[in-house]
Structure formats: structure tokens, C-alpha cells
Amino acid sequence: MEQFLQAGIIGVSLGAQYALLALGFTLIFGILGVVNFSHGGFYMLGGYVAFACVEHLGLPYPLAVLAAILVTAALGWVFELLLIERLVDDHLATLMLTLGLYLVMSTVMLQVFGPLAMDFRFPVTGALRAGPIYAPLENLIVLAICLMAILGLWLVLFRTDLGRGLRALADDRQVAMAQGLRPRILFPAAFALATGLAGLTGALVTPILSLSPGVADPVLATSFLTVILGGLGSLGGAALAAFIVGIVEAYTSVYFGGSIGALVLFVLVLLLLVFRPQGLLGREARGA
Amino acid sequence: MTPLIPRARFLLGGAEIAAILVFAAAFAVPTMTRSVLVYSVMNQALVGVVAAQSVWIMLRMNLLSFASPAFMAIGGYTVAIAGQHDITDAFVLTAAAFLLPALVAVPLGALVLRLKGTYFVLVTFVLSQIMQLLLFETPGLTGGSNGISGIPPVTFLGTELATNKQVVLFACGIALLATIITACLTRYFRQHFAAIEENEILAESLGLVVWRYKALGFVVAAGIAGLAGYSLVTMLLTAHPSSFESGTAVDFIAYTIVGGRASILGPVVGTASLVYATNLFGTHGQYAQGLYGALILVVVLALRGGVVGTVASLVRRIR
Amino acid sequence: MSELRVEGLAKRFGGLRVFQDISFVLPSGALLGVIGPNGAGKTTLINVISGRQPASAGRIVLDGRDVTNQPAHAISRLGLARSFQQTNTFKSVSVRENIARAIRFGQRGIPKGLENLLIEFGLTARLDEQSDKLPYGLQKMLGLAMAFATSPKVLLLDEPAAGLERAERNNVDLFVKHVREAGASVLIVEHDMDLIRRLCPRILVLDAGVLLADGSPAEVLARPDVIAAYLGDSEEAA
């Protein structure tokens, strides 16, 4: 029974992390129509920046996380403004641009930090014991911060003018632009918001799991699976799907071990595409 | 008035014939040198160009596939497992290396290609990740993290192809075969692929069953990737998960984009230049991907046609 | 018989209701105009009937056959073609290649009257020019010609005269004449009231996603609710 509850806690914690990643990815896809191949790269960058701040600059961990967010958001803003803006209507071209960016980013990080995993630890150790339940504090803290970030994102998107503008652009760009919304400011903002979230997640999670050049690809794959499950372009779907993915992954890894979880999820997503291609909460999936 | 519908005279165009001639000529190289370095680089390039052609076929329809490592794995491991059962005939194995990945691609293609292009990119990326997991989780079949080593050499018409030189010649043969298949497919369906690439919505509204052509391309591309996997496993005499890492998809994509996506010569030129460039990095080969990334950015932002496209438009301007 | 029957058709997109309860019949060989202020859902209606977007509710029956939610290529194969409001051609290839593709993908051979149509449009003289380099009006004509080249039984035209010079608008009349001679029925979405009054014996009025009226231009355009719908739209005031 304890195992069941513990797996649940890990699952929810994973879900919150995946939600931040999936929401960011969906923001970029929904608003700009861009499939961001560098999303995993920004997660990794967030981890490395936080690590460098702690290890080499001696900053306290919370400041390091903040630095990670600022660096990843700034880089995202600049990248969108300088490069993606030029080709924003050509979806294949923007995908290639993000792929190119990822390759350059990851090679730079490889050069600076080397190929081995970094010794990056979460500053809080220990666990909470409540009867039979044993929950590592780091998971709980990360869960709390992720939930706050999700709440913050919700507030921005649904309670501010910026957010309303972003959502209008996602719904129907032509109409939104006809009503005077300026993509010039909003597109870089959306991109920066998303990459900042990825960086935040990286800074929080890599000290718990691992920080090495190989972490970006699985993060990207999980983001992809999650947004397909939730429905391409649907924020609510992305969040819901993220928790489902996190919980499935936690339970399959606790009860079956290995990487069966990812396999199970992939098969589930393929089945979903047969019967309900628009995902849980998405709109239209049919081609052309 | 001249006839409304242009009548195509030849199946293969200039670029296709040039590509085929390149690989026919490649047979001569191993006979002219004994340099192990040349053999190595050439073999890498011959494997890479076949995988790049797999990417190129889908790119003709504006679809970016990350699945080449997955289908290469199916082709490569099929050959390795067959080798464990003493099946080494080149013709049988070539057919198997092509057909098995193609068969796997049929249901996948039917599923994903009716949906928007974005799904295709995402699903093929995840597919390559999943293939790695599958390889590790099925040690009984695939040897798991150890892979399958000590694969017997290919036998071609009774002769064992065991020396370095023979292996390179074999790789030339596979590359030539792959090029012929790719050329025939993309030329025969040139109008359809071009219409889908340029304006899918219009093509579909005129009655073209777009998803069927995408699926056809996907199935053949999977088979071609399988051939690349066969060539790779023959070169290494080992089938190992690390050869089919999802990251290698990016290499093949880079070869195609940088070489030029509009012509069959693109993947050829791109693979040759980038494999050569990577070998210049020597022991620092891991930085090659940074170069690929920078080149992709340059091509997408400025030189849209890649090397071949840029050269072609320069030639046109000079004329 | 190539009757197009639309029953209770509705389209919602997210929280937005684009149109609902749209029902009408386009009999074989008939000519029907569809008018309405901007944003009334007319292009989406064509998209849904032609299979480019799925319907949220209702039925589309073509030739007695339920084609609701069939993909665009299937509906095209069954004989329903559409043109696009913006110029929509294969931009990087020649006029000749554009027409060739339309004929090939339509799979019903070259329709009678196509060659004459091309001559009358002035496209024959420019068969080998890249379609992207043609003037706007000719690109639109090419789009119409391509739709015709698939030998359709029903043709949906989305604002064929939009963006055309006064002189060029006669080409639309010409086109409709050719199409009807070939036996097809036509539904025209248009803003150009002169054209509608000239060509269409019957029109539908769509406003804010609702079918306001269905009748002859004289009847329909005199109705106060139709006039009121247009007062909000400054482009065409009856």
C-alpha cells in the first residue's frame, strides 16, 4: 500500500514537471505554430546555468534557479526575435531553425561542461514521514514550485492583457492581428515564456535526476508524447496529459521496472491516434 | 495549340542519372587505393548517404522524418539475427533489410499520415526513442545492451565479402541500389510529390489522395533506411543499440538539408561533405553536431537550396 | 443527377459558433448565390461542404450519397470542386503544369470546353509562364480553370470576383456560362451585388452564421432583415 501511495506522490510530482514543459511547448506551438526542437535543450541549459551559479559563482540555490530562468527566457526572446520572426509562417523552416539552435546550444554546453554527468545536488535532503508514507522533500518542494508556476502561468494567460493577446493569437492569428494585436512583441514574449518555463524545470529537476548532455532528448520525447495525448495546441489538454503521463510513468517504473513506462505510453498514444486523434482536449487533427 | 498535358519522355532526369553514375564510379575507388582511412570515410559516407536518401524522400513532400535510426535498426538487427542462423546470402538479406522495415511502416504510415504534418514529426521522433528502449528490453532477441556481435560476413554469389575492400564494394552496391529505388520513386511520382510539397490543400481539393502518396513515400523511405542499417551492420560486423541512437537522425537530416533538398544530388553532396568534415574533427567528433547546427541555420536563413540548390541557381544566373 | 443537399449543417470552432442550422438544396444544373456580410461564415461553409474542415453537426448529401465528414479528396472524386477566395495555384510551376496537375488529380480526363475557356481567359497565350508571375486577375482565372479541369458536377466558387478589376469581372460570367454548358451546378459566394443579380436566379443570405433568407434576388434583397444585416457592413450597401 505504501508503495502505491509513494508511486502516486512521485507520479504527481513528475506530472507537475511535465506539465511545465508541455505547457511551454504548447504555448510556442499554439501561438507561433512552431515545433520547438530546442525545448529539451532549454531544459538542459536551465540545469547547467543553475549548476554553474551554485558551483562556480557560489550563489545560493534559489538565486541560481532565478538566473536559469532569466538566461533561458532571454535566449528564447532573442532567438525568436532575430531568427524565427523571419520565417514564422514556414513551419518546416522554423522547426529546422529550432533544431539548428539545439545542436549549437548542446555542443556549446558539451564544450563547456564536458560529456560526464555533473555532481549537482538538490540543496534540501531528507524526507517527510506521515505514517507509512515516505516522501522525499526534494520532490515535494519541486512539486510545490511547479504547481505555483502553473498557477502563475494560468494567471498570466487568463488574467492579464498580455495573456489574452497570446490566447487570441493562438485561436486565430488573422482575426487577432486585424484587431490590432501586435505579434512583434507577443511572439518573442510567448517564446521567452516557454523557454523560461523549460529552464525553470531544468534547474529544479536536474539536481534530482541527472544533469548531463543526454537529458535533453528524453525530455523532448516526453513533451511530444504529452502534447499529442493532450491535443496539439490545447493548454488544458497538455496539463491534464502531463499528469497522466507522470502517473503512468511512476507506476510502471515502480511495479515493472526498466523503461516499460515509456513503451506503454507510446503504444497508448498510437492507439489514441487511431480512435481520437485530436487527443484529450484538442480540436482538429486531420491533415491539410 | 501545343498539347495541354506535357508528355514525360524519360523516367530519370539529369540529376538522377548523375547520382547513379556517382555510385557506379564509386566502385572504382577501392580498387585504386588501399588506404584504410579512405575505406573508413568512404564506408561511413556510403552508409550515411542511404540514410540521407530516406530522409530526402519524405522531405520531397515537406515532411521531416526522424525515424531513420528506428528503421535502420530493424534492417540491421534483421540481418544480424539472420547471420546468427547462418543466413548470409546478399540477395536474401537485402530483400529482408528492405521489406521488414517497410512492412512496419505500413500501419504506422496509415495511422499518422492522415493527420497534420506536425504529428508525423513528433511521432517519428518518439519512434526512434522507443526503438532504443525496445532494443534494450529484448535481450533474448537483440542481445540487449550488448547487441549482437561476430556477425558472419555477407556472401555474394557464393563469395564471402570479408576484406575491408570487399565490404566497401558491398556498401557501394547497396548505395547504388538505394539510389536507383529512390530515383525511380521520386521521378515516377514527381508531380504528386511536388504538388503535396508545394500546396497540399490545393492538391487534395483537386482530388489527390494525399495521404496515400505520403504513406507510399514513408514505406519506401523505411525500406531504404533498412538498407542503410544493413550496410552499417556489415561495416561493423556488429549490431549494437549505440549505432541506432535517435541522435543520428539529426546527422542524416543535416546531410540532406545542407546538401540541398530539391535534388537527389543534395543528400549525396551533403553526406560526402559533412562526413568528410566530421573526420577532420578527428577525436573531437562530438563537436560535429555543432557544425551541423550552424550549417542548418545558415541554409534555412540564407541559402535555402543548400549546396546543390545554391550552385544550381548560380549556374542559372551565369548563363 | 448531381444534387447537393445540405441539412442542418453546423460548424463550431473552439467556443465559437461559425454557423448553424444551414439547410438548402442545390438542384442539378442550378445556379445559387450566397451573400452575407464579412465574417458570416461563407468561406467556412464552403470549406465544410468540400471536406476541407469537418462539420460539427448536420448532413451533406451529394448525388444521394451522404458525404458528411468525408475528406476533401473523396468529395472531389465524387464530383464536387471548389475555388478559393485568395489566389491558390502551384506557384512555382507553369500555367500548363498547373492545369495538367488538375486534370491528372481529378482523374476524369480533359473536360469539354476547357481549351476554349483557357483561350477566352487569355491563359493559352501564357501557358509556359510561371503561375506566380501572372497578374492577380489571371491567377484567379487559373484557379477557376483548375477547378473546372477536374470535370466537376457541382462547383463551389468562393468570391471569384474578389480583387478583380471591373473589366475582368466579365470573365466570371464567362466561366459560369462554360460551367453550366458542361452541365454542372454552381454555388457562388460573392460580395459583388451586380454580379449576383446578373447571374443568380436564386440567392441565400447568411448573416452571423444563420441562414436569413432563400429566394429570388428581388424578394430577398427587399427584406428589412437582410437590409439591416448589411447596414453593419460598409462594403456593399445593397
Image: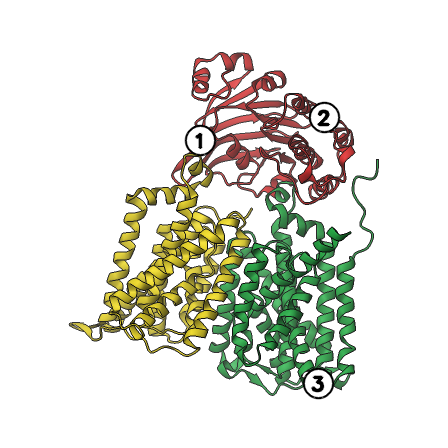
Chain colours: A yellow, B green, C red
Q: Nearer the viewer, mark 3 or mark 2?
A: 3
Marks 1, 2: nearer the viewer: 2
Residue appearing at x 52%, y 12% in the figure: C219
Tell me the distance, in whole angstroms, between the alpha carbons under discs 1 and 2. 33 Å
B26 over A36 or under it: above or below: below
Residue B88, position as x, y percentages in the image: 69, 82
Q: How many marks?
A: 3
Assess disc 1: are there few (<14), some (14-19) or many (≥20) residues with their C-alpha within 10 Å of its C-alpha: many
- Chain bearing mark 3: B
What kind of residue is marked 3?
A: Ser
Q: Secondary structure at mark 1?
A: strand
Q: Tell me the tag on residue C20.
A: 1
Which mark lies nearer to you, 3 or 1? 3
Q: Which residue is mark 3?
A: B35
Kind of residue indicated by mark 1: Gln
Q: CA distance from mark 3 to mark 1?
A: 74 Å
User: Is residue B143 positioned above or below A83 on the image?
Assistant: below
Question: Does the CB distance between marks 1 and 2 fall below 8 Å?
Answer: no
Quadrant of res C76: top right
Residue B253 in sight in this render? yes
Q: A172 or B109: nearer the eye? A: A172
Q: Are marks 1 and 2 on the same chain?
A: yes
- Kindly identify the amino acid type of the residue bearing the numbered disc 2: His
The secondary element bearing badge 2 is classed as helix
* Image quadrant in which the N terminus of chain A is located: bottom left
* Badge 3 and badge 2 in a common chain: no
Whether residue B157 is visible to the viewer of this picture, yes or no, is: no
Residue carrying label 2: C178
> Residue, x 49% and y 16% (percent of image)?
C237
